[in-house]
Image (tube, rainbow, N blue to C red):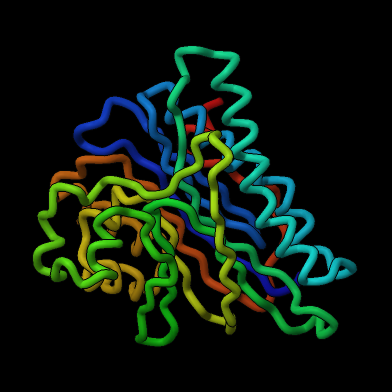
Amino acid sequence: MAMGFTSTARSVVGLVRSGNEDSGLIDSHLIAVADGMGGHAGGEVASAIAVKTLAPLAAISRQHNIDADSIEDLLLNSLYDIDDEIKKVARANIELTGMGTTLTTLMLYSDGENKKEQKVALLHVGDSRCYRLRGSSLQQLSHDHTVLQELLDQGTISAEEAQDHPQSSFLTQAIVGDGTLTPVLTVIDVKPKDRFLICSDGLSGVLSEKEIKQGMKISDPQDALTYLIDKTYSLGAPDNVTVILASVDEQVESLPFTYLGAAANE
């Protein structure tokens, strides 16, 4: 047993959608959420491809004989593998043309020569999100790849104007099999008892940061998820909701990874 993620997760259909296009993955060293797009069938396939292509990295991240740079490179390059697989599957199935997915994933691994030190790598494309709660401080670690976020970054619109902006769901980057990805890997320091949340925009697009923080601060993880999902439902839940809540603990048993959502139904 060693330091790892203790995770609790759920993936549910919203109040408007007829099926779940989200997929997720939980493991003691790797967690991920993918939000598919391209119609009911296409979205399910694309998000499942993303998390199932990532899954083999779970075992690699637990190994102590691989240097940190190599692990980071493997994680970064996994995006190109996902992109290639989406391209291949779409070409073989014309009804899946145009499918794609977001992806937000965290990998916990040993830091270089000091194997007792741990890092977390965040790989992110799209508008799913990652948050960290450390003590009473909440930080959004991911940066949305959306037209709306670009307008905010440029100062073209205010945060208040962004709340009801018509371009809120327009992505500037997603994994769609066209070979144009410009992925960024962010390495984050980690401490025992840090609590991470990754979610599809079915949650973060409905709840405020204050409401997300309120949920993450609930000590029992099942109660925390119930609060977050019930709150989303009470506000209409226009999209599917996938959320993974993961605490960093010093003694975690390595268990087989678990799929969520569309990936679990294949």
x then y, percent, for residue 249: 61, 75
Q: Residue at horizontal 76%, vertical 63%? A: 71
From this view, report whether residue 54 is shown above or below residue 231. above
Q: Report the quarter where the N terminus lies.
A: bottom right
Q: Residue at horizontal 50%, vertical 41%? A: 175
Total marks in image: 0
Q: Is residue 6 visible?
A: no
Give the quarter of the image for residue 52: top right
x then y, percent, for residue 93: 54, 13
Task: Say whether residue 254 is left or right of residue 192.
Answer: right
x then y, percent, for residue 215: 30, 68
From this view, report whether residue 221 is shown above or below residue 75. below
| Front residue (pair 32, 80) | 80
Q: Residue at horizontal 54%, vertical 21%? A: 90
Give the quarter of the image for residue 266: top right
Q: Residue at horizontal 38%, vertical 56%? A: 145
From this view, report whether residue 162 is shown above or below residue 116. above
From this view, report whether residue 181 is shown above or below residue 101. below
x then y, percent, for residue 18: 28, 25
Task: Say whether residue 204 is left or right of residue 260.
Answer: left
Q: Is residue 20 visible?
A: yes
| Front residue (pair 123, 177) | 177
| Front residue (pair 266, 94) | 94
